Amino acid sequence: MSPQNDKVTRMFVLGPKAQLSQSELVGKLHMLELPLTIKSTCYGAVIHGEEKDVLEAVNRIRKLDPSNIFTKDRGFPPGDPRRCRAKRGAAREGFHQLEKEYELLEYVCDALENPEKVSLEEPGKVTPEDFKKIAQECEK
């Protein structure tokens, strides 16, 4: 088992209402003085290191702005030639998914800052009469 197998990689994604910039995020990560590899990205940062150190960084950084700093696992360390844009010459796999997720973050931020109680009801069956009414309204 190689030493790399004991390490994990996490992405930090800053929401659109985040109270700090990506460069401030990277600076805060460095100030933690944890043995991590830290890479600035267009969406925030990527960190790589021992799992306990990575999780400590996640917990401490998210406290800075819990509704606007998001994190998720990344399967490859920073600079991995299988995923590195500089070596591949194009956007890495998963980047377009991240773009779509980012579009939703403002809604997630709002929900975290203004939680509302939600109750879910099992939807009932629509009667044929109600369906006909709905169809007729849509035709108008």
Image (cartoon, rainbow, N blue to C red):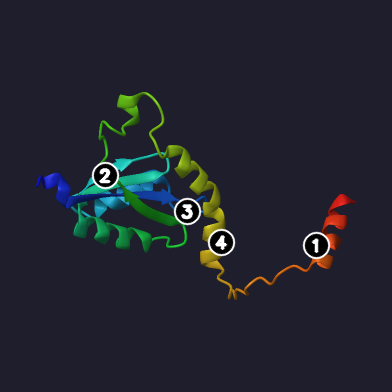
Element assignment for label 1: helix
**Residue 96: image tag:** none
Could you tell which of marks 2 and 3 lies nearer the N-terminus?
3
Of circles 3 and 1, the one toward us is 1
Residue annotated with mark 4:
110
Question: Which one is earlier in the sequence, the residue at label 2 or at label 1?
Answer: 2
| Residue at the spot of label 2 | 38
Disc 4 residue type (three-letter): Asp
Q: CA distance from mark 4 to mark 1?
A: 35 Å
The numbered mark at residue 18 is: 3
Label whose residue precedes the other's in the sequence (3 or 4):
3
What residue is rendered at 42% in x and 62% in y? 66
Lateral position of residue 1 relative to residue 124, left or right: left
Residue hosting label 1: 131
Image height of 111 relative to 96, above or below: below
Marks 3 and 1 sit apart, C-alpha to C-alpha, by 45 Å
Q: Nearer the viewer, residue 78 or 26?
A: 78
In the image, 32: left or right of 2? right
| Disc 1: CA contacts within 10 A as few (<14), some (14-19) or many (>=20) | few
Residue 63: x, y in percent?
37, 64
